[in-house]
Image (tube, helix red, strand yellow):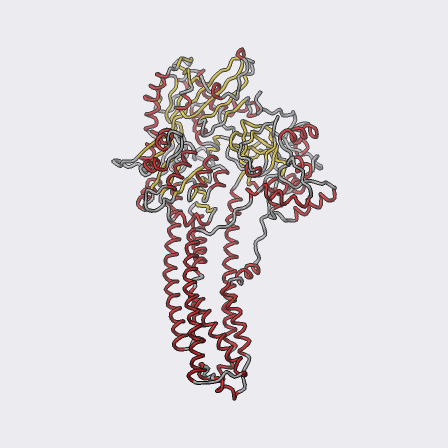
Amino acid sequence: MANNTADHPPGNSVADGNQEGDFGITVMDLRELMELRSGEAVTKIADSYGDVQGVCRRLKTSPIEGLSGNPVDLEKRHAAFGKNFIPPKKPKSFLALVWEALQDVTLIILEIAAVISLGLSFYHPPGGDSELCGETASGVEDEGEAQAGWIEGAAILFSVAIVVLVTAFNDWSKEKQFRGLQNRIEQEQKFTVIRKGQVIQIPVSELVTGDIAQIKYGDLLPADGILIQGNDLKIDESSLTGESDQVRKSLEKDPMLLSGTHVMEGSGRMVVSAVGLNSQTGIIFTLLGAGDSDEEKKIKKAKTQDGIALEIQPLKSDEAVESEEKEPEVEVKRVKKVQVNKKEKSVLQGKLTKLAVQIGKAGLIMSAVTVIILILYFVIDTFGVQGRPWLKECTPIYIQYFVKFFIIGVTVLVVAVPEGLPLAVTISLAYSVKKMMKDNNLVRHLDACETMGNATTICSDKTGTLTMNRMTVVQAYLGDTHYKKVPEPDVIKPFTLEVMVNSIAINSAYTTKILSPEKEGGLPRHVGNKTECSLLGFVLELKRDYQPIRDEIPEESLYKVYTFNSSRKSMSTVLKNTDGSGFRMYSKGASEIVLRKCSHILNTNGEPRIFKPKDRDEMVKNVIEPMACDGLRTICVAYRDFPAEAGEPDWDNEGDILDELTCICVVGIEDPVRHEVPNAILKCQKAGITVRMVTGDNINTARAIATKCGILLPGEDFLCLEGKEFNQLIRNDQGEVEQERLDKVWPKLRVLARSSPTDKHTLVKGIMDSTVLETRQVVAVTGDGTNDGPALKKADVGFAMGIAGTDVAKEASDIILTDDNFTSIVKAVMWGRNVYDSISKFLQFQLTVNVVAVIVAFTGACITQQGRRTQMHCFWNE
C-alpha cells in the first residue's frame, strides 16, 4: 500500500479549528515530541494523541482548511508557542568597535609616545641649565615654544582619537548595512500555507504553530512539523545529523520534519509543530549563543516551574548524556555544520592587505633609519662637536628629545603604511552592493561582487534566464495528426480529449494554477511550475477546466506519485479506480524519454495501437525534431492501466512501472527569448566573457535558442553536445573524468543539452581546474534546482534564481537574481569591474601621497632637524 494518503476526520473545518480556550498541548510537549525519531515518534503520537489528526485537534487546526488567519487567534499562538524568529547575535556596540580600533599596534605605539611626550612637556629645567644641555642646538627657538610643548602630544592623541572614531564608525555602518541586507534576504523568503482553505504564500516569520504548510521539492523547511500527507517525500537532514543519505518520510515510519532540512524529492503537507527558538534549528542556535532573548528566558523559566528535565538537544541519541553541563559541548560538535561561516577576506582585500604589509615593512625600515640618524646626529653634535658633558640635570631634556625622535620615526611609519586600502575596498564594495540591489542582484557574499569583475565564463541555464519563462503550447501531435496550432476540441476524439485533460489536471502539482489577470485586459497569472502552467493553459484553450477534476480527486486521494527529478525527467501519478477495476497511471515528461517507454499510442479514432521503435523514430524525425528546431520544448503525455486481476504491482520497482505506456499526445511549448538577452550576450563577448548554455532541454531546442541569443554564431567552430556525448568524451574506460580530455572539449563548447546537475558541476570544476590558458578561468554559474547546489557552491560566483529558484539553490548561491534575468548578470559584471577601477584609482592616489609624504618626512627629519613641525602635517595628510 502506498504511504502517501491521509484520512481526515469529518467536521475538520476552519471553524472547528479555532475554538476559544487554551490549546490542548503545550510548547514543552511539542519540543519533547520533536526530539523523537522514526518508530519512537510514531509510537508517541499514537499513544498520546491517537494519530496526526489528534495533534491537529489539540492545536485547534484543520488538516484540510488550515487556520482561519484571524489576528486574535494568531496572537494567541504567538503567546503560547512563540514566533518563528531566531534573534540574531547582538551586534557589537560602538564602544566595543572603538576598543577594537584601539588595538592597532601602530596606534598603541603612537598613544604611548604621545603620553610620554605630553608628560615631559610639562617639565622645564632651571633657566641656567639651558645652554649646558644644548637646548638651542637641538632646535628649540624660544621660551614660548617650549611653554607650548604640550600641544604636540595632545595633537597626536587628538589625531589618534579621530582615526579610531572614523574606523569604528565605518565598521559600525558596514555592520548595519549588511544586517539590513540579511534582513531583506530573510523577508523575501516565503512559504506556502493553507488558511481559510486557500493556498497562500506568507513570509516565514509569520508562520505559527498549527499552520498547515505545503512542502515541495527544493524547499528549505523554516519550522518543525509533522507530516500529514506526502508524495514520495525525501529529506536531506545532513545539516542536522551529518548523515548524507536522504531520509524517506511517511506517516507510518517517520513523519517528523525538522527545520533547516531540505526537501530533495516529492511533496506533501505538514502541520507546523514548533517555530523559532522551540524548533530544532532554534535549539541549536541557542546552544551556539545566538538565541539569548526574553522569549528564551520565559521558556527556561517555564521549564523550571513545571519541573520538566527536558533535554535541550536537536536530535536524541541512544547514548545518554552523563551530565547537563556537558550537553552544550556535545551538541555544538554534533551540529557544527549549521554554524554560520566565519567571515573571510575577499581576494582583493587579501591582495591589498598583503601589499599594505609589504609597504609597511619598507616603512618600518625607513622609520628605524630615521630614528637612528636623528639620535646619531644629536649625540655627535651635542657631545662630540660641541663637547658638552652628560649632566644629571639634563637627563629629562635628553629623554624628551629621544621621545620626539621616536615620534618622528613612528610618524614616518604611519605615513608609509596605506591603512586606507582595505577600508577603501570595503567602502567600494558596499557602494557597489547597494547599486547592484537596484539592478536586481541580491548579494549574499561580499566578495562575489569583486569576483564578478574578473569573470571569464558564464554557464547559464536557458529557461527563465535567457528566455521569458512564459510558456505556451503552440503545437500538438494528437491522434496521428501534427497540428501547427492548438486544435479545436471538436476535432479530437472524446476519449483522447478526456484522458488527456485528466492526465494534465491530475499529474501536475496541485499548487500549479492559472489565475485571472490582476488588471483587466492583462495576461493570466501563472502560479507554480511554468511548464505545467503551459499544459493547464492548453486545457483551457481546449475549452475544458482542470479545477473540477482536482476537486473531485483531491491530492490526498492520489495513490502514488513519482515526482519529477533530474534522473527520471518525468512525473507520474497513480490513481486507484473507484469501480475496483485496478489502477491508472498518468505520466508526462521529456518526449524522447517518455516515448522510449511507450508501447502503444492513441490513433485517429482514439484507440490504442501498437507503437513500434520504427514508429518512434519516424515520430522523432517528423514531429519532435521540427518542433525542436523551431525552439520549442517537447513534452509527451501518456498513461497506463493496471488491471485488478493482475494484482497490485510492486510500486517500488520503477523500471517495470514506468514502462509499456500509451502515448496520448506530444505538445510543443514555446518560451520566447528575452528581448534584451542577445544584446547582453554581445556585451559579454565584447568584454572577453564566454557565455555557455547548460540546459536539460533537447539539443535541437537548445541549439535554436542559443542561435537566437547569439551564443552560437554562424560560421564559428563551436560545439553543441548532449550530456551523454559530453561524458563519453571526457571520461576514460573506468568512468573517471580526465582533465586532459576535458581540456580538449570545454574551450569550444557553447551548448550542453540534456545535461544533469552532475554534468554542470563537472563542467564548472573542469573549467576552473584547467591550465590550458595562461590565466585561470573565473566561472560564474546560474542554477535554480536543488541539485544545482554543488555547481553553485563550486563556481567562483553562483547565481540563484530569485523567482524560480528553490531555497536550496538560494542557500548555495553567492548572488540571488531577483528577476531571473541574464541581463542582471551583466550588471553584476559591470559593478564588479567598477570596484577594481575604483580601487586602482585610489591605489594610484594613495601610493603617490604615501611615497611623497615618506620622502618629505624622512629628508625633513634627517637633514633639517625640523621633525617636530613635519610630523603634525604628516598626520593630517594621512
In front of the other: 22 or 28: 28
Residue at position x 44%, y 69% from top? 368
In front of the other: 14 or 878: 878
- The quarter holding residue 225 reads top right
- As displayed, is residue 312 above or below residue 699? below
Q: Residue furthest left?
A: 715
Residue 77 horizontal/vertical position (percent): 65, 40
- As displayed, is residue 456 above or below residue 487? below
Residue 403 horizontal/vertical position (percent): 50, 74
Residue 621 seen from this side? yes
Quadrant assignment for the C terminus: bottom left
- As displayed, is residue 46 above or below residue 144? above
The number of numbered badges drawn on the structure is 0
Image check: 332 left or right of 411? right
Image check: 683 left or right of 792? left
Residue 484 horizontal/vertical position (percent): 34, 24
Residue 532 horizontal/vertical position (percent): 45, 28
Quadrant assignment for the N terminus: top right
Q: Residue furthest top?
A: 645
- The quarter holding residue 37 reads top right
- As displayed, is residue 455 above or below residue 571? below
Image check: 859 left or right of 254? left
- The quarter holding residue 677 reads top left
In front of the other: 75 or 307: 307
In front of the other: 641 or 819: 641
Residue 83 seen from this side? no
Q: Residue furthest bottom?
A: 128
